Amino acid sequence: MLHANNNHNNGLNGNNNINNNARFVGIGRAKAGIIIMTGELWNALCSYGNLELAYKKARKHKTLKPYIIEFEKNLRDNLLLLRTELLLHLYRPQPLQTFILREPKTREISKSEFRDRVVHHALCNAIEPIFEKSFIYDSYANRKGKGTLKALERFEHFRSKATRNNTKAAFALKADIRRYFENVNHGTLLEIIKDRISDERVIWLIKTILANYGKNSKGMPLGNLTSQFFANVYLNKLDWFVKQQLRAKYYIRYVDDFVILHSSSEILEHHKLKIEEFLSKNLKLRLHPDKSKIIAVNRGVGFLGFRVFNRHKLLGKSNVGKTRRKLVTLKAEFDSGKISYDKIHSSFEGWLAYARHGNTYRLRKRIIKKFEGLFTDRIAAVEISRWLKNVSSIRKP
């Protein structure tokens, strides 16, 4: 295996700036297909410019939070301290803060200290371009230009192909992985990472972040940026197995939720067995026994919050129920002063934008009526701004 240049001339001043994340490292390809690094990945990761960029990403949409205001009071000193801790291997993340979310199911979410989130962004800034090149096109979670709506569009495209424009029967293997984030094996993950990153300093930082979760060398905390990124790295092995070994044409994955479409249910049964074997042997994971099944496409396939049929798609019942309950919860939080109406309105507009991608006109009317009934005579700043713009445009000659 070819290794990265491990020049230890780090330097501790804050003037090692970078201008472009994509240029952190020169990337070459060995004959065996192993990506090698010809630049100084660790120095780029720890550079002041990268840490400053990471700080800006970590504070996005949270600029008024007290802990961010406090961090900004001595921004340069705080970033230089982080830089020094990283370069001298003195960096230690703070214990995670955990809390329970019960929608749509009970989950334990972990929250890192802000300075640790800066480090997470700095790490991902540096290594994401290396791994992004290895991801298949149809992996849609936590990637630029992808996301749930793109995944749904791709699903509908594949459904049309598999059914030959709704003229033939087709089936979907709809599956997800049992307790995925809880069961990611640290040793296996590190071996996958080492296939592309040989700099032991970067590996040290990744081990430090993983160890902060501290649950028997397995599992990643929901809510961390690094967990979202490593989730794609870990299941990239599955993606290539499905595409290269099983030769599945119509395969889409979003985190641990994936679907394969085919005209033959027997072939999908075979795929399911082979995937179960691969996950157990190579990634120490299991398919969810209740949520992994083969479905006739014309009966509707549940995917990413929608139930997709041949000619239309509806929001899933769990999504609608969650939204109704969430509105009641937000009203209680608003009445007690825990949340502003502007934030509630912004969240609700986001849900409406998502719901519009399905055949949901009547449903949206009912939900809007409920929303307006809960928040009578309230108006958000964004609504005032829109009104003022409309008035201004009308008055223009």
Image (cartoon, rainbow, N blue to C red):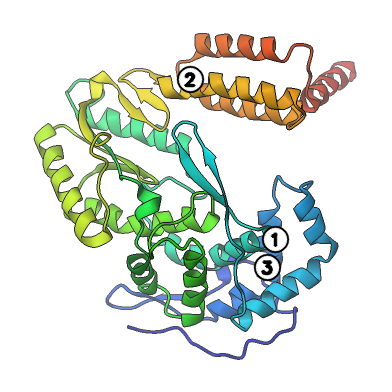
Which quadrant, please, contains the N terminus?
Answer: bottom left
Residue 53 in sight from this viewpoint: yes
Q: Residues within 10 Å of mark 3 (few under 14, many from 20)?
A: many
Residue at 56% x, 9% y is 366
| Rendered image quadrant of residue 165 | top left
Q: Earlier in the sequence, mark 2 or mark 1?
A: 1
Q: Are marks 1 and 3 in contact (CB under 8 Å)?
A: yes
> Which residue is tagged 3?
51
Disc 2 or disc 1, which is closer to the eye? Answer: 2
66, above or below 155, in the image? below
Q: CA distance from mark 3 to mark 2?
A: 41 Å
Q: CA distance from mark 2 to mark 1?
A: 37 Å
Q: Residues within 10 Å of mark 1 (few under 14, many from 20)?
A: many
Q: Is residue 195 left or right of residue 168?
A: right
Q: Nearer the viewer, residue 397 or 385?
A: 385
> Which residue is tagged 1?
55
Q: Earlier in the sequence, mark 3 or mark 2?
A: 3
Disc 3 or disc 2, which is closer to the eye? Answer: 2
Instruction: Classify mark 2: helix, strand or loop.
Output: helix
Amino acid found under the numbered disc labelled 1: Tyr
The image shows residue 162 at horizontal and vertical percentages of 22, 31
> Which residue is tagged 2?
321
Amino acid found under the numbered disc labelled 2: Gly
Instruction: Classify mark 1: helix, strand or loop.
Output: helix
Residue at 81% x, 27% y is 381
Q: Residues within 10 Å of mark 2 (few under 14, many from 20)?
A: few
Instruction: Classify mark 3: helix, strand or loop.
Output: helix
Residue at 46% x, 63% y is 214
